[in-house]
Image (cartoon, helix red, strand yellow):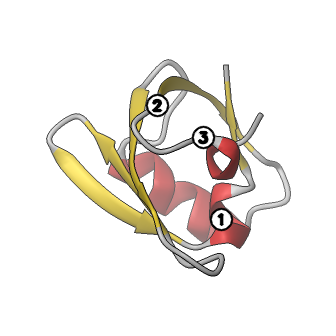
Amino acid sequence: MTLWDLQSKSHACIDSLSDTLSPAVASRLSEMGFTPGQPVICIRRSPLQGPLVVQLGDCVYSLERDIANKIALS
């Protein structure tokens, strides 16, 4: 399951980032806290395949589908 599959108001933990992410994007996601074992909450799913709004710790992020599909959950 990926972050994009997480339903609104659901919780999960980050498992890994895809090897297909560019090094710059993977590095930035890691800096933002998208690391293995980090709990994540889906706050909102935008309509029409719009951005996914998630919370990691005290921070809230909006991710496009192509990025969210490359973050595996456990």
Q: Secondary structure at mark 1?
A: helix
Above or below, 25 relative to 29: below
* Residue at image point 50% right, 33% down: 35
In the image: residue 65, left or right of residue 19 = left
Q: Earlier in the sequence, mark 1 or mark 2?
A: 2
Comparing marks 1 and 2, which lies closer to the viewer?
A: 2
From the image, which quarter does the N terminus lie in? top right
* Residue at image point 62% right, 45% down: 3
- Cα separation, mark 1 vs mark 3, equals 13 Å
Q: Which residue is mark 3?
A: 6
- Cα separation, mark 2 vs mark 3, equals 6 Å
Q: Secondary structure at mark 2?
A: loop
Q: Which residue is mark 1?
A: 67
Task: Confirm or deny contact between disc 2 and disc 3 (CB under 8 A).
Answer: yes
Residue 30 position, x and y percent, is: 47, 47
Category of crowding for the residue at label 3, using alpha-carbon neighbours closer than 10 angstroms: few (below 14), some (14–19), many (at least 20): many
Q: Which residue is mark 2?
A: 10
Category of crowding for the residue at label 2, using alpha-carbon neighbours closer than 10 angstroms: few (below 14), some (14–19), many (at least 20): few
User: What residue type is disc 3 on?
Assistant: Leu
User: What residue type is disc 2 on?
Assistant: Ser
